[in-house]
Structure formats: C-alpha cells, structure tokens
Image (cartoon, rainbow, N blue to C red):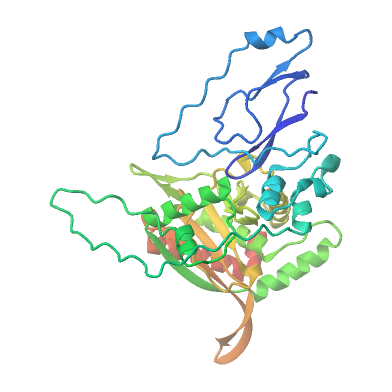
Amino acid sequence: IAAGEPIAEIETDKATMEVEAAEDGRLGRILVAAGTAGVAVNTPIALLLTEGEDATALDQAAAPSAPAPAPAATPAPAATTAPAAPRRPDGSRIAASPLARRLAAARGLDLTTLAGTGPHGRIVRRDVEAARAVPPPAAPLASVPAKAPAAAPAVAAAPGVTRPAAAAGPDARAWAEALGLRFRAEPNSTMRKVIARRLTEAKQTIPHFYLTVDVALDALMRVRAELNARAGDAGWKLSVNDFVIRAVALALAEVPRANAAWTEDATLFFDDVDISVAVATPEGLITPILRRADTKGLRQISTEMRALADKARAGKLRPEEFQGGGFTISNLGMFGVREFAAILNPPQACLLAVGQAEQRAVVRDGAVASVSMMSCTLSTDHRVVDGAVGATFLAAVRRLLEDPLQMLL
C-alpha cells in the first residue's frame, strides 16, 4: 500500500469519504470487516506493516476495544458502511462505490454485469442508474382479514399516572400488508434516517412562523442577462439563485438579528455570514455552506456554489463544507414550485424558501402590466426572531433583488 492510496470508504450521514493510507506499508490484518455498521470514530480498522516489520509485529499491536453498545433510547450511529464489496466468481473484488453498491442492491442489479465508468473502471452511481433494473420477485400478497379487530377503548389515566409516549406514527408496513398492497421495501440510508430525525425534531420543538413577500425581478433579469453576455466563454454564468444568495448575505449583514441561533441560556448572534444552500442528491437534501458570503461578489458566489453542488451530488463534500452555517436557502423554483414553507434546519433560526420566477399580472400606475415575479417565504424560529425582525430582513432582501445594482457596489 502506498502512502495516499485510498484503503477504505466511510459513509457518514451526509457524505462518503475515502480513507487514505498515512504511509507506505503492507496490509497485515483487517480488524473491521467491510460492511460493518456503527463503527465508532477513531476505532482501528486495520494494521499496516511498515518496512522491516513482519507478521510477528501484528500480535504485539493492541487489539481494539469493541465499541460500547448504544443505549436503547439513543439514535442510530451516524457512521455506517454500504453492503460489503461484491466479488467475481474468481474471487477478485469488484470496484464499486458504496452508493453504487447500495443502489444496485435496492434495484436487484448484479454488479458483475455492469461496466464501470469511474476512475480505474470503478462502478459509480451513474452506471447503476443507466443500467436496466431487474425487478425483484413480487412477495406473496398478505391475506386481508375479514374484519379488522376493533380498537381498544381509550382509558383515562389514573391521577398521578403518566401515559406512555405515543408511537412515532402508524406502521406503514403492517398497514400495507394488511391491505394486500404490493410494495418494494428499500432500506433507509443513514442520511435519510438523520434527515427524518432532524426534521421531526425541528417541527415538534421549534415554534415556526412564516412570512412571505413577492419580489419583482424585471430589473434583475436585465442585469443578469447583460452580465452573462459579457462573460462570454469565461466559464461562469450567473443564475437567479446567485443573486438570491448575494441579497440574503447583504441583508443578514444589515439585519444581524436574523443571523442567529437559540440556546436555553443565550441567543447566539454569528459574526460571519455563512449561508447553507440546499442541494438535492439521490440520498436526500444536503446543505453545503458558502462561507462569509457577504464578502463575495456574484461571480465568486456562482463559481463556489457550482463546485459545492457538484461535490454534494457526488457525495464528496468534506465535513467542514456542510457542517455549520447560520442561515439556509432552499430554492425549488427550477421545479416549477410557486411558493412553499420549509421546515427549519436546526439550530439555525431562519430559512428562506424561494419559488419560481414567473410572469404575473400586476397593477402599476393604475394599469395592468406583465411583470416577472418571485415569491420568497421566510421560516423563522419565534424564540429568536420576532415578526418585526423577520419583516425587516425580508424587506432588505426584496429591496436588493428589485434593485440589483446595489449588490454590485
């Protein structure tokens, strides 16, 4: 094994990262088998023999202690691995990314039949998606009971007796099987489990409220078209979302009380304007962060955001590129969504949901005109941001978007 050579892949709740060998050596012993889930951080996974060492050195190495079992009430560990790397009939390993292995297993695809287009012939996500899935055999339909059992009558709790916590929700699998519905069960990835847990926590524990403004974009569209025309073949092109990021960054610098987070003993107001931008991936949403966005111009925002989005979709973001951020932007305008109210990304106190830019009939100077309009909805944590603060922030965003030349100063 050469120093810097990838020797393992670790899938966390947000990304898949390669572990590189720190120095040259020979693989002496594997301590954690491929496919093992819940491996604690800093657990040794293998022993490398360096120059001059032989197999006798392996017995002298301290055996890693087994990770302590997690308490029943704690969530699942954040780090898991994909299914074990498959092998060909001759025993040779099939090079495939963890995401490709998981997708292939869910779609019933045999990796030995796929040709990889990744580095060194590695099978990656696009290879699995391009392949024709083989549908798994349909499970036999569950018989439908003639009559569903009657629900037990509600019993009032006796004084001083605490009711048990309610279940998280109906058991969809039992419901589908009872009705004889055909379905395909695709195991939830670690990322999807974390998203589900965090969003449930956010909606249940954070007092959300929402404010919406409509923004006229005619001036912005003209400025954007002119700047893109001047760019020519320079390799960059401004999007409406780049202007939104710039406007939000400047508005947060102007209204710093919206750049905050709640704790029980104090409200935290962030010095830097670090903006998380939601990016859709096959596993779910991830929010890469544009650091100190208020200090960056439109071109730099566009270039950095495009690079972060590409890394996010490839599952190659480093932890520091998606952990943190004081404010989130989620834009669904490219999907034709006119307006939506998003769930906050804790511990952040604000999230701006951006809709589609569209032509609308607007009354101006007593006459009806066709104007390019866009709706923006601010989700806020009322413990941190009051209505007046949220309204002041949204007014600043709208002013900047409707007069985009201010963002160029």
In x, y percent, where is residue 197? 47, 50
Question: As drawn, which residue projects farthest toward the left?
Answer: 159
Q: Is residue 365 left or right of residue 343?
A: right
Q: Is residue 373 left or right of residue 145?
A: right
**Residue 315 visible (yes or no):** no
Quadrant of the drawing holding the N terminus? top right
Most foreground residue, 233 or 364: 233
The image quadrant that residue 375 belongs to is bottom right
In x, y percent, where is residue 103? 68, 51
**Residue 337 visible (yes or no):** yes
What's the residue at 71%, 38% (across, down)? 85
Question: As drawn, which residue projects farthest toward the bottom?
Answer: 367
Most foreground residue, 244 or 194: 194
In x, y percent, where is residue 333? 62, 69
Q: Is residue 125 left or right of residue 65?
A: right
Q: Relative to 160, is 353 above or below?
A: below
Most foreground residue, 224 or 89: 89
In x, y percent, where is residue 307? 73, 50
Most foreground residue, 277 or 295: 277
